[in-house]
Image (cartoon, rainbow, N blue to C red):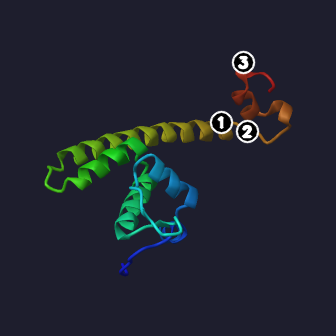
Amino acid sequence: MARISSMTIGSLAEATGTRVETVRWYEKIGLLPSPARSSGNYRLYGPEHLRRLSFVRRSRALGFTVEQIRDLLALADDRERSCAEVDTIARAHLADVERKLADLTRLASELREVIGQCGCGSVADCRIIESLSPLGGPA
């Protein structure tokens, strides 16, 4: 990473693939510390903001909730602590992901079954429409 002394909000947003509004929101909810201000009252972000926002973005990409990220950041800020709490948060998130995957697998199976019943005739005889409709009637 190049040595960065200060960046505008636009530069920080671009460097992390984040929308400017999202950077402001992360500041507002406390995931990103408030930056220094220039004499013209522009936000000036430093390398610590870039690192922290990159952490938040990666965590969001992995599906962690804002509250989980808040907890992970608090733990990351205390470098001497045991990582057992980090492990607990990550394991709980993994369990949620695995539950969602199981639900999606069941959903895919159900959709395959419904699609397999389609005779590609008229809509009036469509098994897909019938299976999606309450009480098996027309929508």
Which residue is labeled 3 in the image? 135
N-terminal of the pair, mark 3 or mark 1, is 1
> Nearest the camera: 63 or 71?
71
Asked if the residues shown at circle 2 and circle 1 are in contact, with their CB atoms under 8 angstroms apart, the answer is yes
- Determine crowd level at label 1: few under 14, some 14-19, many 20+ residues with C-alpha closer than 10 A: some
Which residue is labeled 2 in the image? 118
The answer to whether residue 128 is seen in the rendering is: yes
Q: Which image quadrant for residue 50?
A: bottom left
Which residue is labeled 1 in the image? 114
Q: Residue at x 36, y 48 (%)?
A: 69
Q: Position of residue 124 (x, y in %)?
A: 85, 31
Label tally: 3
* Quarter of the C terminus within the rendering: top right
Q: Which image quadrant for residue 101?
A: top left
Amino acid type at image mark 2: Cys
- Residue 39, above or below 108: below
State how far apart marks 3 and 2 are (Cα). 18 Å
- Determine crowd level at label 2: few under 14, some 14-19, many 20+ residues with C-alpha closer than 10 A: some
Q: Residue at x 73, y 26 (%)?
A: 133
> Nearest the camera: 25 or 127?
25
Mark 1, secondary structure of its residue: helix
Asked if the residues shown at circle 3 and circle 2 are in contact, with their CB atoms under 8 angstroms apart, the answer is no
Q: Position of residue 61 (x, y in %)?
A: 45, 55
